[in-house]
């Protein structure tokens, strides 16, 4: 399912925090939103899963305005893993994941064989199949993250919206998660702080800065030393990853002043 965002504006307290955003995720494409803290990434994503109503502009799913869909139909099409997520559920892991089946159920309906199979498959996909009876509140941060991702998978959406899904994950589970998203080839909008992960995972990147999109395109086209200096305020070189060929960003962790960002190294 194709996602298009047209001239999006979102405001708080009379002030636009996102203004005039246009971006797209083609069907089956992983589109990444990257940018500094406060650039508007989470705000944009919240409009896609209907947590926020834009003051202007539209979010389109296959050409239909998401605000014109019923809540049930929208929930069957879009599943989200937001940053603001509860950690005090007094539920088992399986009970949390089965919540993803809610859009397909009538009120007070129990689980059927299809629900149980979907939940088991979703838990296995995130490496939590052996933890179904554990209390969610007793899990580590990384384990909770994987369970909530399994809940999103159990929802069987056509579109995934993931806001910093690698937070709290160790490097092994980060790699596994990104590989899982690539293998699923489901239309995905994802925000990531890790630019190298974004370069490896995403088919398309949208760079946000001060509430607007300042660059869009393939990771190779977008992630240039000039953009990294201008938007992120860092000095970096971009080369090819020795194992995958993806863009690899090497940051200068010794930089001491903004004036040095684009200066060529001596020698």
Image: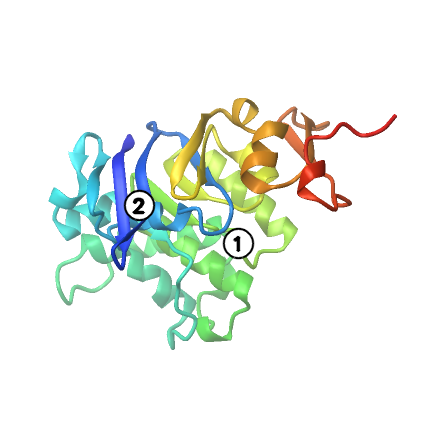
Task: Determine whether 214 is above or below 74 in the image.
Answer: above
Rendered residue at 26%/34% (across/down):
7
Residue 228: image quadrant is top right
Task: Determine whether 221 is above or below 179 in the image.
Answer: above
For label 1, the residue is 127
Residue 113, can we see it?
A: no
State the SS at label 2.
loop
Rendered residue at 41%/75% (across/down):
88
Name the one closer to the observer, 204 or 182: 204
For label 2, the residue is 156
Rendered residue at 64%/50% (across/down):
171
Residue 239: image quadrant is top right
Q: How is the image coloured?
A: rainbow
Alpha-carbon neighbours of circle 1 within 10 Å: few (<14), some, or many (≥20)? Answer: some
Point out the image quarter for the N terminus: top left
Rendered residue at 34%/46% (across/down):
45
């Amino acid at each position: 399912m194709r996602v298009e965002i047209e001239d999006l504006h979102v405001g708080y307290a009379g002030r636009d925090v996102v203004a005039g955003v246009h971006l797209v995720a083609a069907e089956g494409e992983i589109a990444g939103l990257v940018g500094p803290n406060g650039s508007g990434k989470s705000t944009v994503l919240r409009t896609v899963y209907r947590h926020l109503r834009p003051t202007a502009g539209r979010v389109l799913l296959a050409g239909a305005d998401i605000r014109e869909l019923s809540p049930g139909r929208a929930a069957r099409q879009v599943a989200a893993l937001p940053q603001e997520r509860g950690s005090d559920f007094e539920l088992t892991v399986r009970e949390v994941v089965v919540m993803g089946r809610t859009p397909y159920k009538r009120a007070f309906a129990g689980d059927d064989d299809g629900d149980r199979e979907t939940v088991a498959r979703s838990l296995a996909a995130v490496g939590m199949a052996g933890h179904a009876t554990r209390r969610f509140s007793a899990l580590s941060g990384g384990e909770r993250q994987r369970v909530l991702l399994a809940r999103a998978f159990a929802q069987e959406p056509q579109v995934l919206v993931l806001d910093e899904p690698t937070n709290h994950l160790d490097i092994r589970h980060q790699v596994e998660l990104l590989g899982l998203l690539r293998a699923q080839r489901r239309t995905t909008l994802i925000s990531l702080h890790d630019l190298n992960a974004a370069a490896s995972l995403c088919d398309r990147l949208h760079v946000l800065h001060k509430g607007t999109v300042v660059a869009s395109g393939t990771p190779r086209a977008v992630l240039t030393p000039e953009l990294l200096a201008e938007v992120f305020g860092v000095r970096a070189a971009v080369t090819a990853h020795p194992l995958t060929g993806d863009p690899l960003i090497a940051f200068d962790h010794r930089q001491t002043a903004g004036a040095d960002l684009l200066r060529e190294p001596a020698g």
